[in-house]
Amino acid sequence: MTNGWGTNGGGPLPPQQPSPAGQVQFDEPDWAALADQHQREQSRRKRMKAAGGVLAAVVAVGGITAVAAATSSSGEPKADPTVVVEATSAASQQPDTGGDPSPSALPSDSPSASAPASASASASAPASPSRGASKGPGKAPSSAPAASPAGPPDPLTVISSAATDTAPLTPAGVLPAATVQVNGKTWTRLADAQTATCYQATTGGLGNVLAAQGCRSMIRVTYTSGNSAVTVGIAVLDTKAQADAVIAAFTGQVQGLVPSGHTAYCTSTGCQGTHASIGRYVYLTVSGTVNPGGTAADATATAAGPSFAATARDQLLARGRR
């Protein structure tokens, strides 16, 4: 008797028949198929890795070639930014564990910026040596200019102080000419003298001005042309400042000089004259006539006075060049 479950009412079940040969009793995986599939997956992944490395290398070589071509065509690297690519793929740097590669080990579709392989031509070009670089050991060259040889001293500076103006001082040394040509006339040397007491060779208060500045001596030389006479006087002081002070307080005049037995001239004020200074010297002229009386104005002598003054100045400045 059967029930709704397809069994005999509680009777024993019929025994199970054994499965045919080659069949398993339970549903198990096909291990051989899985092994084949796994081997195919491994082969595919390896091919993908190799393809990724080759692709990255090709891109790197292409970038280097592009920059090299730009450099060779213009002689210099272009100003355009250089594309930098990864020369070695990240996948090739990962060890092969035999399992699924991690996401970081897969080939990348874009170049990596973390470890660039520089394709810049300037990176491989040797740095040019600096123009001022030394070829051997030693001190760096100094930028200071080399000292030039000292030139001759300034003549005016030399004659501005007794400490530097040491050449002998005599009438013949300062005004050595025996004759002088002035304004078409020949002037002949008549007399010369050097007076240690300066005021004795002056008049009209000039002696006091010279004494206040420590005048050392007065040199005088007289030239005549006919009856016209010009006496050149040179007051010798120690410094330029003293000479300048004499000019600032100037009064009076130098006395005309004649040899003993000649008619004196311009021994008192009233004659034409000039006065100036150069260095430590005050140079003066007085112009007149050697006619009896010696005080009359003489146009020829007056006109010649400035020329004699210029001659004295030049001779004094020449002392600084000796």
Image: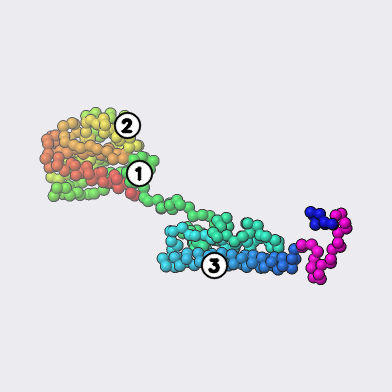
Magenta segment range? Answer: 8-28
Give the main secondary structure, helix, strand or loop, of the magenta stretch.
loop
Q: State which mark lies toward you, 1 or 2.
A: 1
Whole-angstrom CA distance, mark 3 to mark 1, is: 85 Å
The image shows residue 157, relative to residue 250, as above or below, that is: below
Q: Which mark is residue 158?
A: 1
Q: Which mark is residue 58?
A: 3
At x 20%, y 49%, the residue is 179
The image shows residue 173, relative to residue 111, as above or below, that is: above
In the rendered structure, which disc, 1 or 2, sits on the residue that comes first in sequence? Answer: 1
Instruction: Tell me if 86 is positioned left or right of 275 in this view.
Output: right
Magenta-drawn stretch contains 212: no
- Determine the secondary structure under disc 1: helix
In the rendered structure, which disc, 3 or 1, sits on the residue that comes first in sequence? Answer: 3
At x 85%, y 54%, the residue is 9
Indicate the position of residue 278 as horizontal and vertical percent values: 28, 40
Magenta-drawn stretch contains 17: yes
Foreground residue among 267 and 307: 307
